[in-house]
Image (spheres, rainbow, N blue to C red):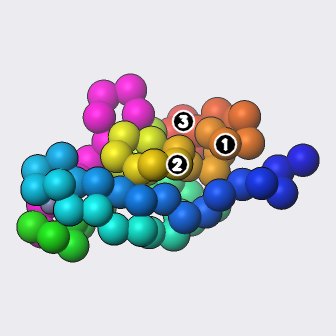
Amino acid sequence: MNAETVLRSEITCPECGHSAVETMPTNACQYFYDCTGCGEVLKPKAGDCCVFCSYGTVPCPPIQTGGECCAA
Ligand SMILES: [Zn+2]
């Protein structure tokens, strides 16, 4: 059961500390994210599949549901 899947995650920019709540797509990982504070293009840290796993308060939906991330 995955009714508890959270689709909103707060991303915090490692460059400027700005945070913004973003809605995560359920069918694809988001690899790039433009910081709304400083304009920096964020990319996942090594080993992470998407920017939400690296910088968000909530990991991406595939991880939440216990599956592999979409990064094949
Ligand atoms: Zn920033």
Queried whether the magenta region covers residue 45, the answer comes back as yes
Within 10 Å of the Cα at label 3, are there few (<14), some (14-19), or many (20+) other Cα atoms?
few
Q: Mark 3 — residue?
A: 72
Q: Residue at x 41, y 34 (%)?
A: 48
Q: Residue at x 15, y 70 (%)?
A: 37
- Residue type marked 1: Gln
Q: Residue at x 50, y 53 (%)?
A: 29
- Residue type marked 2: Val
Q: Secondary structure at mark 3?
A: loop
Disc number at residue 64?
1
| Residue at mark 1 to residue at mark 2: CA–CA distance | 8 Å
The disc, 1 or 3, on the residue closer to the chain's N-terminal end is 1
- Residue type marked 3: Ala
Highlighted range, magenta: 39-48
Q: Are marks 1 and 3 in contact (CB under 8 Å)?
A: no
Q: Are marks 1 and 2 in contact (CB under 8 Å)?
A: yes
Disc 2: residue Cβ within 8 A of ligand 1's nearest atom = no
Q: Residue at x 11, y 50 (%)?
A: 15
Q: Secondary structure at mark 2?
A: loop
The disc, 2 or 3, on the residue closer to the chain's N-terminal end is 2
Could you tell me what secondary structure mostly forms the magenta stretch?
loop
Q: Quadrant of residue 20?
A: bottom left
Q: Mark 2 — residue?
A: 58
Queried whether the magenta region covers residue 65, the answer comes back as no
Q: Are marks 2 and 3 in contact (CB under 8 Å)?
A: no
Residue 27 placement (x, y as % from top left): 63, 60
Q: Is residue 54 left or right of residue 25?
A: left
Q: Secondary structure at mark 1?
A: helix
Q: Residue furthest right?
A: 1
Residue 4 placement (x, y as % from top left): 77, 54
Disc 1: residue Cβ within 8 A of ligand 1's nearest atom = no
Q: Is residue 34 left or right of residue 63?
A: left
